[in-house]
Amino acid sequence: MSEPMLSFENVHTFYGKIEALKGVSLTVNRGEIVTLIGANGAGKTTLLMTLCGSPRAASGTIRFEGEDITQRETHLIMQGGIAVSPEGRRVFPGLSVLENLQMGGFFSDAERIEEDLERVFTLFPRLRERSAQRAGTMSGGEQQMLAIGRALMSRPRLLLLDEPSLGLAPLIIAQIFQIVQEIRDEGVTVFLVEQNAHRALALADRGYVIENGRIVMSDTGSALLANADIRKAYLGG
Amino acid sequence: MNDLLPVLAQQVINGLSLGSIYALIAIGYTMVYGIIGMINFAHGEIYMIGAYVGVVTITALGAASGAMPLALVLSGALIIAVVVTAAYGWTVERVAYRPLRGSPRLVPLISAIGMSIFLQNYVQLGQGARDISVPPLLPGNLFEIDVEGFPVSLSLTRALIIFATLALMIALTLYISRSRMGRACRACSQDMGMANLLGIDTNRVISFTFVVGAILAAVGGVLIGLSIGKINPFIGFVAGIKAFTAAVLGGIGSIPGAMLGGVLLGLTETFASAFLPTEYKDVVAFGLLVLILLFRPTGLLGTPDVEKV
Ligand SMILES: Nc1ncnc2c1ncn2[C@@H]1O[C@H](COP(=O)(O)OP(=O)(O)OP(=O)(O)O)[C@@H](O)[C@H]1O
Ligand SMILES: [Mg+2]
Protein backbone atom coordinates (compact mmCIF):
# COMPACT_ATOMS: atom_id res chain seq x y z
CA MET A 1 0.00 0.00 0.00
CA SER A 2 1.85 3.08 -1.20
CA GLU A 3 -0.39 5.95 -0.31
CA PRO A 4 -3.45 5.98 1.99
CA MET A 5 -6.85 6.45 0.37
CA LEU A 6 -7.74 9.19 2.83
CA SER A 7 -5.55 11.29 5.05
CA PHE A 8 -6.01 14.12 7.52
CA GLU A 9 -2.89 16.15 8.26
CA ASN A 10 -3.07 18.46 11.26
CA VAL A 11 -6.67 19.50 10.59
CA HIS A 12 -8.26 22.21 12.71
CA THR A 13 -11.99 23.02 12.61
CA PHE A 14 -13.85 25.78 14.39
CA TYR A 15 -17.48 26.56 15.19
CA GLY A 16 -17.19 30.29 15.66
CA LYS A 17 -14.55 30.54 18.36
CA ILE A 18 -14.94 26.99 19.59
CA GLU A 19 -12.17 24.78 18.31
CA ALA A 20 -13.78 21.40 17.73
CA LEU A 21 -10.83 19.71 15.97
CA LYS A 22 -7.42 20.59 17.37
CA GLY A 23 -4.97 19.29 14.84
CA VAL A 24 -6.22 15.88 13.76
CA SER A 25 -4.10 13.53 11.69
CA LEU A 26 -5.22 10.10 10.56
CA THR A 27 -5.25 7.79 7.55
CA VAL A 28 -7.60 5.27 6.00
CA ASN A 29 -6.26 2.70 3.54
CA ARG A 30 -8.15 1.24 0.63
CA GLY A 31 -10.24 -1.77 1.63
CA GLU A 32 -10.09 -1.13 5.37
CA ILE A 33 -12.79 -0.64 7.94
CA VAL A 34 -11.48 2.10 10.19
CA THR A 35 -13.43 3.19 13.22
CA LEU A 36 -13.34 6.40 15.21
CA ILE A 37 -14.57 6.16 18.77
CA GLY A 38 -14.98 8.82 21.44
CA ALA A 39 -17.34 10.25 24.02
CA ASN A 40 -20.21 12.66 23.34
CA GLY A 41 -18.93 15.95 22.06
CA ALA A 42 -15.42 14.64 21.39
CA GLY A 43 -15.56 15.78 17.77
CA LYS A 44 -16.41 12.61 15.83
CA THR A 45 -19.20 14.11 13.75
CA THR A 46 -17.17 17.26 13.21
CA LEU A 47 -14.31 15.17 11.84
CA LEU A 48 -16.57 13.33 9.36
CA MET A 49 -18.33 16.49 8.25
CA THR A 50 -15.05 18.38 7.86
CA LEU A 51 -14.09 15.68 5.40
CA CYS A 52 -17.31 16.53 3.51
CA GLY A 53 -16.43 20.24 3.57
CA SER A 54 -19.12 21.42 5.96
CA PRO A 55 -17.88 22.84 8.29
CA ARG A 56 -14.72 23.64 6.43
CA ALA A 57 -11.29 22.96 7.91
CA ALA A 58 -9.64 26.18 9.08
CA SER A 59 -6.18 24.75 8.50
CA GLY A 60 -4.48 21.47 7.69
CA THR A 61 -4.87 19.21 4.68
CA ILE A 62 -7.38 16.53 3.75
CA ARG A 63 -6.39 14.26 0.89
CA PHE A 64 -8.57 11.72 -0.85
CA GLU A 65 -7.08 9.39 -3.47
CA GLY A 66 -4.07 11.64 -3.73
CA GLU A 67 -5.98 14.88 -4.28
CA ASP A 68 -6.19 17.77 -1.86
CA ILE A 69 -9.93 18.20 -1.20
CA THR A 70 -9.64 20.53 1.79
CA GLN A 71 -11.14 23.51 -0.03
CA ARG A 72 -13.28 21.65 -2.56
CA GLU A 73 -17.00 22.46 -2.54
CA THR A 74 -19.14 19.92 -0.69
CA HIS A 75 -21.15 18.78 -3.69
CA LEU A 76 -17.95 18.18 -5.66
CA ILE A 77 -16.39 16.19 -2.82
CA MET A 78 -19.51 14.03 -2.65
CA GLN A 79 -19.52 13.50 -6.42
CA GLY A 80 -15.97 12.21 -6.23
CA GLY A 81 -16.38 8.76 -4.69
CA ILE A 82 -17.34 9.55 -1.09
CA ALA A 83 -20.81 9.02 0.41
CA VAL A 84 -22.15 9.49 3.91
CA SER A 85 -24.86 8.11 6.15
CA PRO A 86 -24.89 11.09 8.49
CA GLU A 87 -25.62 11.50 12.17
CA GLY A 88 -29.38 11.32 12.68
CA ARG A 89 -29.81 9.48 9.32
CA ARG A 90 -31.42 12.48 7.63
CA VAL A 91 -33.61 10.56 5.23
CA PHE A 92 -35.95 12.87 3.29
CA PRO A 93 -39.09 12.32 5.34
CA GLY A 94 -41.63 13.33 2.70
CA LEU A 95 -40.02 11.33 -0.09
CA SER A 96 -40.75 7.64 -0.57
CA VAL A 97 -38.07 5.04 0.12
CA LEU A 98 -37.55 4.64 -3.61
CA GLU A 99 -37.24 8.40 -4.13
CA ASN A 100 -34.70 8.63 -1.32
CA LEU A 101 -32.63 5.96 -3.04
CA GLN A 102 -32.99 7.72 -6.39
CA MET A 103 -31.67 10.89 -4.75
CA GLY A 104 -28.63 8.89 -3.65
CA GLY A 105 -28.04 7.93 -7.28
CA PHE A 106 -28.72 11.41 -8.60
CA PHE A 107 -25.90 11.34 -11.12
CA SER A 108 -26.51 7.84 -12.47
CA ASP A 109 -28.43 7.03 -15.64
CA ALA A 110 -31.60 4.93 -15.46
CA GLU A 111 -29.82 1.67 -16.18
CA ARG A 112 -27.22 2.15 -13.49
CA ILE A 113 -29.91 3.19 -10.99
CA GLU A 114 -31.73 -0.08 -11.67
CA GLU A 115 -28.56 -2.07 -11.00
CA ASP A 116 -27.78 -0.17 -7.82
CA LEU A 117 -31.36 -0.44 -6.55
CA GLU A 118 -31.11 -4.19 -7.02
CA ARG A 119 -27.87 -4.27 -5.05
CA VAL A 120 -29.33 -2.18 -2.21
CA PHE A 121 -32.55 -4.21 -2.13
CA THR A 122 -30.47 -7.38 -1.92
CA LEU A 123 -28.56 -6.01 1.06
CA PHE A 124 -31.73 -4.63 2.67
CA PRO A 125 -34.76 -6.71 1.60
CA ARG A 126 -36.90 -4.64 3.95
CA LEU A 127 -36.37 -1.57 1.76
CA ARG A 128 -37.77 -3.40 -1.24
CA GLU A 129 -40.95 -4.24 0.68
CA ARG A 130 -41.28 -0.63 1.75
CA SER A 131 -40.18 1.11 -1.43
CA ALA A 132 -43.42 3.10 -1.78
CA GLN A 133 -43.61 4.12 1.88
CA ARG A 134 -42.81 7.68 2.96
CA ALA A 135 -39.43 7.56 4.62
CA GLY A 136 -40.58 9.69 7.56
CA THR A 137 -43.01 6.99 8.64
CA MET A 138 -40.41 4.22 8.83
CA SER A 139 -38.91 2.85 12.05
CA GLY A 140 -35.50 4.01 13.24
CA GLY A 141 -33.82 0.81 12.08
CA GLU A 142 -35.45 1.03 8.66
CA GLN A 143 -34.41 4.65 8.31
CA GLN A 144 -30.82 3.70 9.14
CA MET A 145 -30.91 1.00 6.45
CA LEU A 146 -32.31 3.57 4.04
CA ALA A 147 -29.59 6.08 4.91
CA ILE A 148 -26.89 3.49 4.22
CA GLY A 149 -28.66 2.28 1.08
CA ARG A 150 -28.99 5.85 -0.18
CA ALA A 151 -25.27 6.39 0.37
CA LEU A 152 -24.45 3.21 -1.58
CA MET A 153 -26.49 4.38 -4.57
CA SER A 154 -23.64 6.62 -5.72
CA ARG A 155 -21.22 3.66 -5.79
CA PRO A 156 -18.84 5.27 -3.30
CA ARG A 157 -15.31 4.02 -2.91
CA LEU A 158 -15.30 5.43 0.63
CA LEU A 159 -18.40 5.08 2.81
CA LEU A 160 -18.74 7.27 5.92
CA LEU A 161 -21.07 6.06 8.67
CA ASP A 162 -21.89 8.28 11.65
CA GLU A 163 -23.22 6.22 14.55
CA PRO A 164 -25.37 3.82 12.56
CA SER A 165 -26.25 1.86 15.72
CA LEU A 166 -27.61 4.81 17.68
CA GLY A 167 -30.97 4.12 19.30
CA LEU A 168 -31.47 0.72 17.66
CA ALA A 169 -32.35 -2.64 19.22
CA PRO A 170 -29.44 -5.11 19.61
CA LEU A 171 -30.81 -7.43 16.94
CA ILE A 172 -30.97 -4.61 14.38
CA ILE A 173 -27.50 -3.40 15.38
CA ALA A 174 -26.08 -6.86 14.77
CA GLN A 175 -27.76 -6.90 11.38
CA ILE A 176 -26.37 -3.49 10.44
CA PHE A 177 -22.83 -4.38 11.48
CA GLN A 178 -23.14 -7.61 9.49
CA ILE A 179 -24.10 -5.55 6.44
CA VAL A 180 -21.22 -3.10 6.95
CA GLN A 181 -18.93 -6.13 6.77
CA GLU A 182 -20.61 -7.28 3.55
CA ILE A 183 -20.25 -3.82 2.05
CA ARG A 184 -16.54 -3.87 2.78
CA ASP A 185 -16.25 -7.36 1.30
CA GLU A 186 -17.71 -5.92 -1.91
CA GLY A 187 -14.70 -3.61 -2.00
CA VAL A 188 -15.94 -0.41 -0.36
CA THR A 189 -13.67 1.24 2.20
CA VAL A 190 -15.54 2.11 5.39
CA PHE A 191 -14.91 4.88 7.90
CA LEU A 192 -17.15 4.22 10.88
CA VAL A 193 -17.87 6.61 13.75
CA GLU A 194 -19.32 4.84 16.76
CA GLN A 195 -20.10 5.14 20.43
CA ASN A 196 -20.85 1.44 20.45
CA ALA A 197 -17.11 0.92 20.81
CA HIS A 198 -17.20 -2.79 21.50
CA ARG A 199 -18.87 -3.78 18.26
CA ALA A 200 -17.06 -1.16 16.23
CA LEU A 201 -13.61 -2.23 17.40
CA ALA A 202 -14.48 -5.90 16.93
CA LEU A 203 -15.41 -5.20 13.34
CA ALA A 204 -12.70 -2.70 12.41
CA ASP A 205 -9.22 -3.34 11.08
CA ARG A 206 -7.96 -0.25 12.84
CA GLY A 207 -9.35 2.31 15.22
CA TYR A 208 -8.71 5.86 16.40
CA VAL A 209 -9.77 7.31 19.73
CA ILE A 210 -10.74 10.98 19.79
CA GLU A 211 -10.94 13.02 22.96
CA ASN A 212 -11.80 16.67 23.10
CA GLY A 213 -10.86 17.35 19.47
CA ARG A 214 -7.60 15.39 19.51
CA ILE A 215 -6.69 11.88 18.43
CA VAL A 216 -5.29 10.32 21.59
CA MET A 217 -4.72 6.75 20.50
CA SER A 218 -4.66 4.57 17.42
CA ASP A 219 -4.07 0.86 16.92
CA THR A 220 -5.59 -2.21 15.38
CA GLY A 221 -9.17 -2.87 16.36
CA SER A 222 -8.29 -5.95 18.41
CA ALA A 223 -5.43 -4.20 20.24
CA LEU A 224 -7.70 -1.31 21.22
CA LEU A 225 -10.33 -3.79 22.29
CA ALA A 226 -7.80 -5.42 24.60
CA ASN A 227 -6.39 -2.13 25.92
CA ALA A 228 -7.09 -1.60 29.62
CA ASP A 229 -7.58 2.19 29.38
CA ILE A 230 -9.95 1.81 26.47
CA ARG A 231 -11.89 -0.89 28.28
CA LYS A 232 -12.28 1.39 31.25
CA ALA A 233 -13.24 4.53 29.33
CA TYR A 234 -15.35 3.20 26.48
CA LEU A 235 -16.29 -0.39 27.16
CA GLY A 236 -17.65 -0.13 30.67
CA GLY A 237 -14.70 -1.81 32.45
CA MET B 1 -84.18 36.98 -7.27
CA ASN B 2 -84.25 35.15 -10.57
CA ASP B 3 -81.14 37.03 -11.64
CA LEU B 4 -79.10 35.30 -8.93
CA LEU B 5 -78.12 32.28 -10.97
CA PRO B 6 -76.64 34.19 -13.92
CA VAL B 7 -74.80 36.54 -11.57
CA LEU B 8 -73.34 33.59 -9.69
CA ALA B 9 -72.29 31.89 -12.91
CA GLN B 10 -70.65 35.05 -14.21
CA GLN B 11 -68.82 35.62 -10.93
CA VAL B 12 -67.50 32.07 -10.91
CA ILE B 13 -66.01 32.69 -14.37
CA ASN B 14 -64.54 36.05 -13.33
CA GLY B 15 -63.26 34.65 -10.03
CA LEU B 16 -61.61 31.69 -11.71
CA SER B 17 -59.72 33.89 -14.12
CA LEU B 18 -58.60 36.33 -11.43
CA GLY B 19 -57.71 33.41 -9.17
CA SER B 20 -55.68 31.81 -11.95
CA ILE B 21 -53.48 34.90 -12.13
CA TYR B 22 -53.04 34.87 -8.36
CA ALA B 23 -52.17 31.19 -8.47
CA LEU B 24 -49.57 31.72 -11.21
CA ILE B 25 -47.82 34.35 -9.11
CA ALA B 26 -48.32 32.54 -5.80
CA ILE B 27 -46.34 29.53 -6.97
CA GLY B 28 -43.21 31.66 -7.21
CA TYR B 29 -43.59 32.75 -3.59
CA THR B 30 -44.30 29.27 -2.37
CA MET B 31 -41.50 27.48 -4.22
CA VAL B 32 -38.85 29.95 -3.13
CA TYR B 33 -40.12 29.83 0.43
CA GLY B 34 -40.16 26.04 0.32
CA ILE B 35 -36.50 25.97 -0.67
CA ILE B 36 -34.82 28.83 1.18
CA GLY B 37 -37.46 29.70 3.78
CA MET B 38 -37.67 33.32 2.65
CA ILE B 39 -40.25 35.50 0.96
CA ASN B 40 -39.05 36.85 -2.37
CA PHE B 41 -40.27 40.41 -2.05
CA ALA B 42 -39.23 41.24 -5.58
CA HIS B 43 -41.54 38.62 -7.06
CA GLY B 44 -44.43 41.05 -7.69
CA GLU B 45 -42.04 43.14 -9.78
CA ILE B 46 -41.01 40.07 -11.73
CA TYR B 47 -44.64 39.64 -12.68
CA MET B 48 -44.86 43.31 -13.67
CA ILE B 49 -41.78 42.93 -15.86
CA GLY B 50 -43.39 39.91 -17.51
CA ALA B 51 -46.40 42.07 -18.33
CA TYR B 52 -44.21 44.80 -19.83
CA VAL B 53 -42.12 42.47 -21.92
CA GLY B 54 -45.36 40.95 -23.20
CA VAL B 55 -46.85 44.31 -24.18
CA VAL B 56 -43.69 45.56 -25.80
CA THR B 57 -43.40 42.35 -27.80
CA ILE B 58 -47.04 42.39 -28.86
CA THR B 59 -46.76 46.01 -29.96
CA ALA B 60 -43.53 45.37 -31.83
CA LEU B 61 -44.79 42.22 -33.54
CA GLY B 62 -48.09 43.89 -34.37
CA ALA B 63 -46.32 46.91 -35.89
CA ALA B 64 -43.80 44.82 -37.78
CA SER B 65 -46.50 43.10 -39.70
CA GLY B 66 -50.15 43.91 -39.41
CA ALA B 67 -50.98 40.65 -41.08
CA MET B 68 -49.09 38.42 -38.67
CA PRO B 69 -51.37 35.64 -37.46
CA LEU B 70 -52.82 36.22 -34.03
CA ALA B 71 -51.62 32.93 -32.61
CA LEU B 72 -48.08 33.74 -33.68
CA VAL B 73 -48.11 37.19 -32.05
CA LEU B 74 -49.53 35.75 -28.87
CA SER B 75 -47.17 32.80 -28.58
CA GLY B 76 -44.25 35.00 -29.59
CA ALA B 77 -45.11 37.44 -26.81
CA LEU B 78 -45.48 34.63 -24.28
CA ILE B 79 -42.21 32.98 -25.22
CA ILE B 80 -40.20 36.19 -25.20
CA ALA B 81 -41.79 37.33 -21.94
CA VAL B 82 -41.03 33.97 -20.34
CA VAL B 83 -37.41 33.93 -21.44
CA VAL B 84 -36.65 37.53 -20.52
CA THR B 85 -38.50 37.35 -17.19
CA ALA B 86 -36.80 34.08 -16.29
CA ALA B 87 -33.48 35.87 -16.73
CA TYR B 88 -34.68 38.60 -14.35
CA GLY B 89 -35.82 36.00 -11.79
CA TRP B 90 -32.46 34.27 -11.99
CA THR B 91 -30.62 37.57 -11.61
CA VAL B 92 -32.68 38.61 -8.58
CA GLU B 93 -31.50 35.47 -6.80
CA ARG B 94 -27.89 35.98 -7.82
CA VAL B 95 -27.81 39.64 -6.85
CA ALA B 96 -30.18 40.00 -3.91
CA TYR B 97 -30.06 36.59 -2.22
CA ARG B 98 -27.01 34.51 -2.99
CA PRO B 99 -24.32 36.91 -1.71
CA LEU B 100 -26.25 37.11 1.56
CA ARG B 101 -26.69 33.41 2.14
CA GLY B 102 -25.96 32.63 5.77
CA SER B 103 -26.52 36.17 7.02
CA PRO B 104 -29.36 36.98 9.46
CA ARG B 105 -32.79 36.63 7.86
CA LEU B 106 -33.54 40.33 7.98
CA VAL B 107 -30.65 41.14 5.65
CA PRO B 108 -31.81 39.34 2.47
CA LEU B 109 -35.32 40.53 3.21
CA ILE B 110 -34.16 44.12 3.03
CA SER B 111 -32.08 43.51 -0.08
CA ALA B 112 -35.13 41.93 -1.74
CA ILE B 113 -37.25 44.97 -0.90
CA GLY B 114 -34.46 47.12 -2.33
CA MET B 115 -34.50 44.98 -5.45
CA SER B 116 -38.24 45.45 -5.75
CA ILE B 117 -37.99 49.24 -5.47
CA PHE B 118 -35.14 49.22 -7.96
CA LEU B 119 -37.06 47.19 -10.54
CA GLN B 120 -40.13 49.39 -10.19
CA ASN B 121 -38.12 52.54 -10.81
CA TYR B 122 -36.12 50.93 -13.58
CA VAL B 123 -39.30 50.12 -15.50
CA GLN B 124 -40.65 53.62 -14.79
CA LEU B 125 -37.51 55.12 -16.29
CA GLY B 126 -37.70 52.98 -19.39
CA GLN B 127 -41.44 52.92 -19.94
CA GLY B 128 -42.86 55.86 -18.02
CA ALA B 129 -44.94 55.83 -14.88
CA ARG B 130 -48.31 56.06 -16.59
CA ASP B 131 -50.59 53.35 -17.83
CA ILE B 132 -49.69 51.98 -21.20
CA SER B 133 -52.41 50.27 -23.15
CA VAL B 134 -52.26 46.72 -24.41
CA PRO B 135 -53.52 46.08 -27.94
CA PRO B 136 -56.73 44.05 -27.70
CA LEU B 137 -55.52 40.82 -29.26
CA LEU B 138 -58.43 38.64 -28.35
CA PRO B 139 -61.67 40.59 -28.51
CA GLY B 140 -64.92 38.73 -28.25
CA ASN B 141 -66.28 35.82 -26.32
CA LEU B 142 -65.72 32.12 -26.41
CA PHE B 143 -69.42 31.86 -25.63
CA GLU B 144 -72.28 33.92 -24.39
CA ILE B 145 -75.37 32.18 -23.17
CA ASP B 146 -78.65 33.34 -21.91
CA VAL B 147 -79.54 32.29 -18.39
CA GLU B 148 -83.07 33.20 -17.40
CA GLY B 149 -82.94 36.30 -19.55
CA PHE B 150 -79.48 37.43 -18.44
CA PRO B 151 -76.27 36.99 -20.42
CA VAL B 152 -73.41 34.92 -19.03
CA SER B 153 -70.23 35.13 -21.04
CA LEU B 154 -66.72 33.76 -21.09
CA SER B 155 -64.43 36.10 -22.97
CA LEU B 156 -61.67 34.63 -25.08
CA THR B 157 -59.05 36.29 -22.89
CA ARG B 158 -60.51 34.85 -19.71
CA ALA B 159 -60.81 31.44 -21.31
CA LEU B 160 -57.14 31.65 -22.29
CA ILE B 161 -56.18 32.62 -18.73
CA ILE B 162 -58.08 29.75 -17.18
CA PHE B 163 -56.94 27.08 -19.62
CA ALA B 164 -53.33 28.22 -19.81
CA THR B 165 -53.16 28.26 -16.00
CA LEU B 166 -54.74 24.83 -15.77
CA ALA B 167 -52.28 23.42 -18.29
CA LEU B 168 -49.27 24.98 -16.53
CA MET B 169 -50.44 23.72 -13.14
CA ILE B 170 -50.79 20.18 -14.44
CA ALA B 171 -47.41 20.36 -16.14
CA LEU B 172 -45.70 21.74 -13.03
CA THR B 173 -47.32 19.16 -10.76
CA LEU B 174 -46.17 16.33 -13.00
CA TYR B 175 -42.70 17.81 -13.32
CA ILE B 176 -42.24 18.23 -9.58
CA SER B 177 -43.59 14.80 -8.74
CA ARG B 178 -41.98 12.77 -11.53
CA SER B 179 -38.80 14.37 -12.79
CA ARG B 180 -35.32 14.12 -11.38
CA MET B 181 -35.06 17.88 -10.89
CA GLY B 182 -38.50 17.97 -9.26
CA ARG B 183 -37.39 15.29 -6.83
CA ALA B 184 -34.27 17.31 -6.05
CA CYS B 185 -36.48 20.35 -5.33
CA ARG B 186 -38.57 18.38 -2.88
CA ALA B 187 -35.49 16.89 -1.25
CA CYS B 188 -33.88 20.32 -0.90
CA SER B 189 -37.01 21.75 0.66
CA GLN B 190 -36.85 19.02 3.30
CA ASP B 191 -33.12 18.99 4.02
CA MET B 192 -30.93 21.17 1.84
CA GLY B 193 -27.75 20.20 3.69
CA MET B 194 -28.39 16.51 3.10
CA ALA B 195 -29.08 17.07 -0.58
CA ASN B 196 -25.71 18.83 -0.74
CA LEU B 197 -24.11 15.79 0.95
CA LEU B 198 -25.50 13.66 -1.88
CA GLY B 199 -23.51 15.72 -4.37
CA ILE B 200 -26.31 18.01 -5.45
CA ASP B 201 -25.32 21.55 -6.33
CA THR B 202 -27.99 23.18 -4.19
CA ASN B 203 -27.32 26.62 -5.67
CA ARG B 204 -28.58 25.30 -8.99
CA VAL B 205 -31.75 24.01 -7.37
CA ILE B 206 -32.33 27.39 -5.73
CA SER B 207 -31.82 29.18 -9.05
CA PHE B 208 -34.22 26.75 -10.65
CA THR B 209 -37.04 27.66 -8.25
CA PHE B 210 -36.55 31.38 -8.93
CA VAL B 211 -36.65 30.71 -12.66
CA VAL B 212 -39.78 28.55 -12.51
CA GLY B 213 -41.51 31.16 -10.36
CA ALA B 214 -40.55 33.89 -12.82
CA ILE B 215 -41.79 31.88 -15.81
CA LEU B 216 -45.23 31.39 -14.29
CA ALA B 217 -45.41 35.03 -13.17
CA ALA B 218 -44.47 36.16 -16.70
CA VAL B 219 -47.34 34.17 -18.19
CA GLY B 220 -49.63 35.74 -15.59
CA GLY B 221 -48.31 39.20 -16.47
CA VAL B 222 -48.84 38.83 -20.21
CA LEU B 223 -52.34 37.45 -19.70
CA ILE B 224 -53.40 40.13 -17.24
CA GLY B 225 -52.27 42.80 -19.70
CA LEU B 226 -54.50 41.28 -22.36
CA SER B 227 -57.37 40.96 -19.94
CA ILE B 228 -57.30 44.42 -18.39
CA GLY B 229 -56.01 46.24 -21.46
CA LYS B 230 -53.52 48.44 -19.63
CA ILE B 231 -50.56 48.07 -17.31
CA ASN B 232 -48.32 50.34 -15.26
CA PRO B 233 -45.11 49.85 -13.26
CA PHE B 234 -47.06 49.52 -10.01
CA ILE B 235 -49.22 46.52 -10.82
CA GLY B 236 -46.69 44.22 -9.20
CA PHE B 237 -47.24 45.61 -5.75
CA VAL B 238 -50.90 44.82 -5.18
CA ALA B 239 -50.79 41.62 -7.25
CA GLY B 240 -47.75 40.54 -5.26
CA ILE B 241 -49.48 41.09 -1.94
CA LYS B 242 -52.57 39.26 -3.13
CA ALA B 243 -50.61 36.34 -4.50
CA PHE B 244 -48.55 36.17 -1.32
CA THR B 245 -51.83 36.08 0.61
CA ALA B 246 -52.98 33.26 -1.64
CA ALA B 247 -49.77 31.35 -0.96
CA VAL B 248 -50.19 31.72 2.81
CA LEU B 249 -53.85 30.84 2.54
CA GLY B 250 -53.04 27.60 0.76
CA GLY B 251 -50.09 26.87 3.03
CA ILE B 252 -46.82 28.55 2.14
CA GLY B 253 -44.35 26.07 0.75
CA SER B 254 -47.04 23.88 -0.80
CA ILE B 255 -47.49 24.07 -4.59
CA PRO B 256 -51.04 22.62 -4.62
CA GLY B 257 -51.73 25.02 -1.74
CA ALA B 258 -50.70 28.02 -3.85
CA MET B 259 -52.98 26.86 -6.64
CA LEU B 260 -55.93 26.35 -4.31
CA GLY B 261 -55.23 29.57 -2.39
CA GLY B 262 -55.07 31.59 -5.60
CA VAL B 263 -58.34 30.31 -6.96
CA LEU B 264 -60.08 30.65 -3.59
CA LEU B 265 -58.87 34.22 -3.18
CA GLY B 266 -59.93 35.14 -6.71
CA LEU B 267 -63.41 33.71 -6.18
CA THR B 268 -63.79 35.38 -2.78
CA GLU B 269 -62.80 38.73 -4.19
CA THR B 270 -65.09 38.67 -7.19
CA PHE B 271 -68.02 37.48 -5.12
CA ALA B 272 -67.39 40.14 -2.51
CA SER B 273 -67.31 42.87 -5.14
CA ALA B 274 -70.46 41.53 -6.77
CA PHE B 275 -72.55 41.52 -3.63
CA LEU B 276 -70.93 44.20 -1.46
CA PRO B 277 -69.65 47.69 -2.20
CA THR B 278 -66.35 47.23 -4.08
CA GLU B 279 -64.30 48.71 -1.25
CA TYR B 280 -65.08 45.62 0.79
CA LYS B 281 -63.47 43.14 -1.54
CA ASP B 282 -60.03 43.37 0.07
CA VAL B 283 -61.55 43.31 3.55
CA VAL B 284 -63.31 40.08 2.71
CA ALA B 285 -60.21 38.60 1.09
CA PHE B 286 -57.93 39.33 4.02
CA GLY B 287 -60.72 38.41 6.46
CA LEU B 288 -60.78 34.98 4.85
CA LEU B 289 -57.04 34.71 5.34
CA VAL B 290 -57.27 35.58 9.03
CA LEU B 291 -60.13 33.17 9.54
CA ILE B 292 -58.34 30.27 7.90
CA LEU B 293 -55.08 30.93 9.70
CA LEU B 294 -56.97 30.99 13.01
CA PHE B 295 -58.17 27.44 12.44
CA ARG B 296 -55.28 26.16 10.34
CA PRO B 297 -52.11 28.10 11.14
CA THR B 298 -50.21 26.25 8.41
CA GLY B 299 -52.76 27.23 5.74
CA LEU B 300 -55.14 24.92 3.93
CA LEU B 301 -52.67 22.41 2.50
CA GLY B 302 -49.55 23.28 4.45
CA THR B 303 -47.99 20.69 6.71
CA PRO B 304 -45.67 21.74 9.48
CA ASP B 305 -42.16 21.37 8.07
CA VAL B 306 -42.54 18.09 6.20
CA GLU B 307 -42.62 18.18 2.39
CA LYS B 308 -42.83 21.85 1.70
CA VAL B 309 -42.56 21.82 -2.06
N1 LIG C 1 -23.01 23.51 14.79
C1 LIG C 1 -22.25 23.66 15.90
N2 LIG C 1 -22.07 24.87 16.45
C2 LIG C 1 -21.30 25.04 17.55
N3 LIG C 1 -20.69 24.04 18.18
C3 LIG C 1 -20.82 22.79 17.68
C4 LIG C 1 -21.62 22.54 16.53
N4 LIG C 1 -21.59 21.21 16.27
C5 LIG C 1 -20.81 20.67 17.23
N5 LIG C 1 -20.34 21.61 18.08
C6 LIG C 1 -19.45 21.40 19.21
O1 LIG C 1 -18.29 20.76 18.76
C7 LIG C 1 -17.90 19.75 19.64
C8 LIG C 1 -17.80 18.42 18.90
O2 LIG C 1 -19.12 18.03 18.49
P1 LIG C 1 -19.41 16.75 17.62
O3 LIG C 1 -20.83 16.81 17.21
O4 LIG C 1 -18.39 16.64 16.56
O5 LIG C 1 -19.19 15.58 18.68
P2 LIG C 1 -19.45 14.02 18.55
O6 LIG C 1 -18.20 13.38 18.96
O7 LIG C 1 -20.00 13.69 17.24
O8 LIG C 1 -20.55 13.79 19.69
P3 LIG C 1 -21.79 12.78 19.73
O9 LIG C 1 -21.24 11.46 20.12
O10 LIG C 1 -22.66 13.34 20.80
O11 LIG C 1 -22.43 12.78 18.39
C9 LIG C 1 -18.90 19.75 20.76
O12 LIG C 1 -18.35 20.47 21.84
C10 LIG C 1 -20.08 20.46 20.21
O13 LIG C 1 -20.76 21.17 21.22
MG1 LIG D 1 -21.78 12.96 16.59
Image (cartoon, coloured by chain):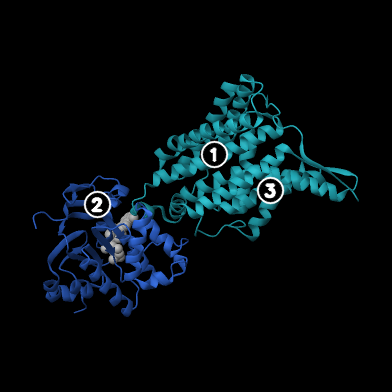
Chain colours: A blue, B cyan
Q: What kind of element bears circle 1?
A: helix
Residue B1, position in %: x, y? 91, 51
C-alpha gap between disc 2 and disc 1: 42 Å
Parent chain of label 3: B
Query: Looking at numbered disc 3 in the image, what kind of residue is underneath it?
Result: Leu
Question: Which mark's residue is nearer the viewer, 3 or 1?
Answer: 1
Determine which of the numbered discs, if any, sits on residue A13 in the image. Answer: 2
The residue indicated by pointer 1 is: B215
Quadrant of residue A201 in the image? Answer: bottom left
Figure quadrant, ligand 1: bottom left
The residue carrying mark 2 has its beta carbon less than 8 Å from ligand 1: no
Specify few, some or many for label 1: CA neighbours under 10 Å numbering under 14, 14-19, or 20 or more. many
| Circles 3, 2 touching at the beta carbon (< 8 Å) | no
Determine which of the numbered discs, if any, sits on residue A163 in the image. Answer: none
Query: Looking at numbered disc 1 in the image, what kind of residue is underneath it?
Result: Ile
Question: Which mark's residue is nearer the viewer, 2 or 1?
Answer: 1
